[in-house]
Image (spheres, helix red, strand yellow):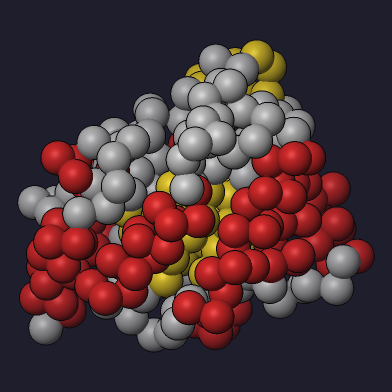
């Protein structure tokens, strides 16, 4: 597992920047007048110019989220990534909220290096009862010929409450044993809210041989503390204009964030 993670991200603790695609066709918030490609290109350029180690494309704007994503949305984001592919200079991943199968399909179709999703657990959520199937998702990935595509398991779902009463560290340890993820992600309650530092510490303590990343809410003022514990992080909201999730990425905020990361790395 450690070798697979290193193969994709290298030896340093990776900082992955989010490209939040605008609401896609089929989503209630979709606006046909918006140029989704131009917006995604601007965010990608800002992240790469700032020196992020990797980027991830996601349908964060497709609210309310679905467990079985509209095929039109997946096809649309695949088209957008295809148009941007010649410009992508770093490893990239994908995430179709909250559908592991659609995420795997998108990753394979676009040649992604990694995927992120909720693959394990049972939750009561804003979208209803949530029971992902890691075995089905991993077999689907392998059947499509991409066993090399890294699987990043978010083990503390946003917008949801775990119906599994085991502690978060116990759930993480069990997921690693039963599902063999390439990395484990720890999240806050919703997009843009930080994971508890104590949760990061506790999860890392029980899975020392697996990469543990902070998945949400990492900010300029906290990234040093986060990277002192975690093996990397995923960043979105704090890079946006005024730090607002639904705004475009502010190139200056992105550059300042990575300046702080470089200070931490020495």
Residue in the foreground of this view, choosing between 141 and 227: 141
Numbered disc total: 0
- Quadrant housing residue 165: top right
- Left or right of 231 on screen, residue 175: right
Q: Is residue 205 visible?
A: no
Question: Residue pushed farthest front?
Answer: 33
Relative to the observer, which residue lies in front, 23 or 106?
Answer: 23
Q: Give me the residue at 55% from left, 35% from top.
A: 32
In percent of the image, x 73 and y 50: which residue is there?
A: 75
Q: Position of residue 172 (x, y in %)?
A: 54, 46
Q: Quadrant of the C terminus?
A: bottom left
What residue do we see at 78% from left, 40% from top? 71
Tell me where residue 138 appears, x and y as whole percent. Answer: 79, 57
The residue lying furthest to the right in this view is: 143
| 127 shown above or below 194 | above
Task: From the viewer's perspective, tell me whether residue 47 is left or right of residue 90.
Answer: left
């Amino acid at each position: 597992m450690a070798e697979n993670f290193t193969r994709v991200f290298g030896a340093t603790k990776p900082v992955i920047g989010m490209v939040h695609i605008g609401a896609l066709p089929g989503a209630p918030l979709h606006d046909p007048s918006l140029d989704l490609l131009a917006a995604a290109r601007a965010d990608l350029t800002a992240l790469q110019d700032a020196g992020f180690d990797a980027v991830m494309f996601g349908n964060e704007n497709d609210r309310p989220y679905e467990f079985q994503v509209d095929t039109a949305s997946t096809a649309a984001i695949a088209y957008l990534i295809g148009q941007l592919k010649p410009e992508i200079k770093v490893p990239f991943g994908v995430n179709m909220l909250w559908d592991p199968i659609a995420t795997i399909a998108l990753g394979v179709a676009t040649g992604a290096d990694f995927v992120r999703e909720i693959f394990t657990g049972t939750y009561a959520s804003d979208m209803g009862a949530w029971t992902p199937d890691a075995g089905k998702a991993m077999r689907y990935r392998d059947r499509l010929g991409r066993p090399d595509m890294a699987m990043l398991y978010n083990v503390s779902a946003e917008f949801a409450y775990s119906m599994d009463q085991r502690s978060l560290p116990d759930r993480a340890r069990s997921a690693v044993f039963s599902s063999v993820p390439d990395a484990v992600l720890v999240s806050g309650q919703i997009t843009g809210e930080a994971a508890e530092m104590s949760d990061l510490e506790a999860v890392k303590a029980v899975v020392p041989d697996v990469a543990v990343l902070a998945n949400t809410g990492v900010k300029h003022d906290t990234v040093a503390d986060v990277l002192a514990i975690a093996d990397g992080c995923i960043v979105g909201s704090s890079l946006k204009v005024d730090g607002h999730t639904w705004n475009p990425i502010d190139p200056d905020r992105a550059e300042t964030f990575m300046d702080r990361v470089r200070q931490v790395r020495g």
